[in-house]
Amino acid sequence: MAGVKGRSGGARKGAGRPKGSKNINSQDSVKKLEELKFDPIREMITQIETIDKQLKETYVGKDGQVMPCLRLGSGAHAQIMATRGTLINNLMRYAYRPVVEKVQTEEVSDSNTMMINFTFDSEKELDEDADT
């Protein structure tokens, strides 16, 4: 029935899930996590705390020098820091919602235009300003 008005796809008033409501999969996921007593936010915070603790732990070596307990190469250290950053970014999604920036514009009327002209009394003032 091509060409019949009102029978093609597209948005229709009142159709679809209400804005802000959770879809079925989200509701099921939340229910399952509650059944398992698993809190993803708490787990991410625990991971960050564990990483921080391991990076801060030190011991005193035989020569009296303070050494880190967790000795990492630069690649492993970079990976741990990247993992930590990812955890923090994931947590921020729970805490912050994106804010849409609105630009406000004002109409400017030409009726109250002011012009300022700077003039110099002499060449001496012009030379003094150029030196500074």
Image (spheres, rainbow, N blue to C red):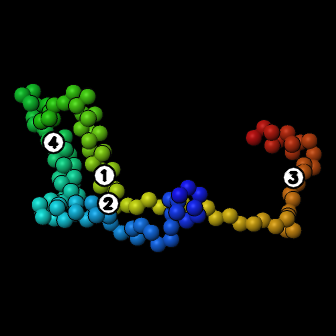
- The kind of residue on which mark 3 rests is Phe
Camera-side residue: 44 or 54? 44
The residue indicated by pointer 2 is 94
The residue indicated by pointer 3 is 118
Q: In the picture, which quadrant includes the C terminus?
A: top right
Q: Are marks 2 and 3 in contact (CB under 8 Å)?
A: no
Q: Secondary structure at mark 3?
A: loop
Q: With 15 as the anchor, is 25 left or right in this view? A: left
Residue 36: name its quadrant: bottom left
Which comes before the other along the chain, label 2 or label 3?
A: 2
- The kind of residue on which mark 4 rests is Gln
Tell me the residue at 47%/72% (across/down): 14
Residue 59: name its quadrant: top left
Residue 56 in view in this figure: no
Q: With 38 as the anchor, is 123 left or right in this view? A: right
The residue indicated by pointer 4 is 54
Closer to the observer: label 2 or label 3?
Answer: 2
Tell me the residue at 93%/49% (across/down): 121
Which comes before the other along the chain, label 2 or label 4?
A: 4
Q: Residues within 10 Å of mark 1 (few under 14, many from 20)?
A: few
Between the residue at mark 3 and the residue at mark 1, the CA separation in whole angstroms equals 56 Å
Closer to the observer: label 3 or label 1?
Answer: 1
Residue 65 in view in this figure: yes
The residue indicated by pointer 1 is 90
Q: Position of residue 67 (x, y in %)?
A: 14, 33
Camera-side residue: 5 or 81? 5
Camera-side residue: 47 or 74? 47
Between the residue at mark 4 and the residue at mark 1, the CA separation in whole angstroms equals 21 Å
Q: Are marks 2 and 1 in contact (CB under 8 Å)?
A: yes
